[in-house]
Image (tube, coloured by chain):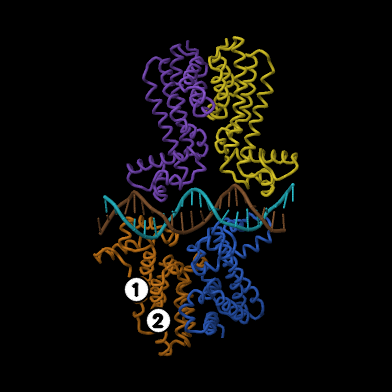
Chain colours: A blue, B orange, C purple, D yellow, E brown, F cyan
Amino acid sequence: MVKSKIKDPQLILKRQRQICQGALKVFRSKGYHATSIREISKACHISLGSLYDYIEKKEDILFLVHKEILDQIYDCLNENINKFNDPVEQLTNTLKALFYLSCRLKEEILFVYTESKSLEKKYLYEVLGKEAEFVNELETLIKKGVKTGQFICPNPEVFSNIVAFIWSIIPLRGWNLVPKNSEEEIIEILTSLVLKGLDVK
Amino acid sequence: MVKSKIKDPQLILKRQRQICQGALKVFRSKGYHATSIREISKACHISLGSLYDYIEKKEDILFLVHKEILDQIYDCLNENINKFNDPVEQLTNTLKALFYLSCRLKEEILFVYTESKSLEKKYLYEVLGKEAEFVNELETLIKKGVKTGQFICPNPEVFSNIVAFIWSIIPLRGWNLVPKNSEEEIIEILTSLVLKGLDVK
Amino acid sequence: MVKSKIKDPQLILKRQRQICQGALKVFRSKGYHATSIREISKACHISLGSLYDYIEKKEDILFLVHKEILDQIYDCLNENINKFNDPVEQLTNTLKALFYLSCRLKEEILFVYTESKSLEKKYLYEVLGKEAEFVNELETLIKKGVKTGQFICPNPEVFSNIVAFIWSIIPLRGWNLVPKNSEEEIIEILTSLVLKGLDVK
Amino acid sequence: MVKSKIKDPQLILKRQRQICQGALKVFRSKGYHATSIREISKACHISLGSLYDYIEKKEDILFLVHKEILDQIYDCLNENINKFNDPVEQLTNTLKALFYLSCRLKEEILFVYTESKSLEKKYLYEVLGKEAEFVNELETLIKKGVKTGQFICPNPEVFSNIVAFIWSIIPLRGWNLVPKNSEEEIIEILTSLVLKGLDVK
DNA sequence: AATGAATGAGAATTCATTCAT
DNA sequence: CATGAATGAATTCTCATTCAT
């Protein structure tokens, strides 16, 4: 996806991961726009010239970071969604796993939310597509529960979007919540809200 | 809050509003960082030199725009929260008014979410404080409903935060929802979710 | 032709002439590509930032310099071509005036020849168009002499091009000629060659 | 002339020719300055590292290309100048051969004219010396014709320079000529002009 | 109060050249 | 001999801010 002048594909992967990690470190504190390529170069211990052997332009780094973060999220979803067979257990378990992840990746998820608008179209579509997939998996799960009669949900498409959105509350609004409430407590309340929304007894 | 070299306070207000409106126009399409002061100057029809008579630095404009948007939101809240006496009616009515507002101010609210991180501390605290007030009003309302026994809610503080967050779903994730579902339908589902979360029959 | 951010058109003209002169000074010794914008900025005593208020990109300077030089050449042509009525006198006088100019503008003309390839299309066409006009005026003059029977010339179009080309010999190959022969002598020989080519007795 | 790290002189020659041909291909379309070493490396199918085993710096390539082109020109001159014994035939034949060559090497000759200024002194002198030799051979030929009484020419040195210059008209100004006139016709007119200049009946 | 010309620090990006393998 | 990854100085251009009028 991101073009590189280097021939060795293994090296490309290694260095792009290195760039990602360095970039994320500085992006977290200053945001994408306020971070200069020089700072990224220092943070990932790759010289300015070499950096440009692995990317074409600054925006490529933004995309690499997005991809890295989104991959972690989808991996979490996929690892957990099929651990159980019963829809209620399946949803509860997946939600909790995702919520715990959102606590761990607070800053990363906040970053994705606030900076994805700076991606060029090509990359933005890629990212939005990935998000849509994420929502789709939740939708499929909800529909399954509706079929078994365990969920009541007149519009699973909208509802799965709402769930996906609620999932990001801790990264996006944690500053007003977490200082006074434990993350576990919040996760409990959020999970229960979703289940109530599906009329699970 | 924003320092100005001009003496006439009436003029300051007039010009700062003018700046706000011009700035918002360009911010919407290009974001804060990608917009130059020159562009803002043109968009608000105030010369570059004069602009700096009413602000000290670019960030001041970011704050002015934030304030403008937040004021509209709180005005909406305050206008609607006391139209009824019954907590359920009060909440339902307020939520719907706010949801409709969020549809009208989609881009503005998205802007506040994605750009507030660029505010300097002084301004950021001001903005976060305003948001906390917003949540507080919702919390007070929920507590009142709990007292009358109409709401069941073990942690009104967290729940009011959740409600405030859900309120912003259309600006933040509308791209995946609105093309296929009407805003009215979504608002209906969201309102019902909140009421279910409070165990309102 | 060259876009400027400055409003006062008088000032634009003044500064663009200032840029031209400074640029030419450095271009002469280092060529266009090897000269940095910073050097131009210093040579014309305009700060880097201001420079970019009067041009959009480096190439604009190249075009401005081209225009300045070409204008001098056409002014010379136009001032001299109509001083006489007899075609032979007309041609002789114009040629000599032009040759003397080519001696005065040796470096400038060399510059136009070697650097016009670096102009972007839009500008290149403008420059080539101007050159074509120059040749056209010579062609018209030759045709007039052919009509009066004073010149014999089967293909005035090609011949006028040849004359226009011969005109540039001193700037382009002077290094091998001028050290050993006086410019006057060379001009005499060149003029006589052209007249012989037209079978003028 | 151009220093190389490699010992085998045969290989040096082979590779330098390879470099020349690749370089010329890209120089033609982008010019010397705008062409990067990387592009040259790709065009001649020699890795970046190896390239620097056969040259010391970018300018060396510029010189190699110059030499390659100039050699072709002198080869043409030398092959043709002694095919006849009569000065008029000798000159006519040589001129035509050279003109046909100038049509074939349009871009190469233009390149030499516009880029030789970028050569460092050492190389520039080498190139100018070669050109002077070229002119000298023409001068000798003209002097011979003057001696036999077939040419009238008061200053053969200047005249031979003029002839050498006229020779390059098609590469340098062909854009304004060739679209409308055939190359043969132009060559005929040019040859006739030179002969008229020497008062050949 | 208003204007807009001037400034220079700093941004992203390129590229000739080196050097370890 | 050959390869190609690594380097960092230098380049063009932008832009927030100041200041003379």
Spatial separation of the CA atoms under disc 1 and disc 2: 15 Å
* Residue at 46 percent of width and 46 percent of height: C37
Relative side of B104 to A155, left or right: left
Q: Which residue is mark 2?
A: B136
Q: Position of residue E8 (x, y in %)?
A: 41, 55
User: Which chain letter matches label 2?
Assistant: B
Name the foreground residue: C19 vs D28: C19
* Residue at 33 percent of width and 63 percent of height: B55
Instruction: Name the image quarter holding residue C2.
Output: top left
Q: Position of residue C17 (x, y in %)?
A: 38, 39
User: Which chain letter matches label 1?
Assistant: B
Relative side of D6 to B62, left or right: right
Q: Position of residue A105 (x, y in %)?
A: 56, 74
Above-or-below relation of D196 to C51: above
The residue under label 1 is which amino acid type?
Asp
Tell which tag, 1 or 2, sits nearer the viewer. 2
Q: Is residue C133 visible?
A: yes
Above-or-below relation of B18 to D3: below
Kindly give the residue lying farthest to the left in the view shown: B8
Q: Quadrant of the N terminus of chain D?
A: top right
Name the foreground residue: C119 vs B105: C119
Q: Is residue D45 visible?
A: no
Q: Which residue is mark 1?
A: B75
* Residue at 55 percent of width and 56 percent of height: A57
The residue under label 2 is which amino acid type?
Asn
Residue D79 is marked as none
Name the foreground residue: D49 vs A156: D49
Element under disc 2: helix
Which mark sits nearer the N-terminus, 1 or 2? 1
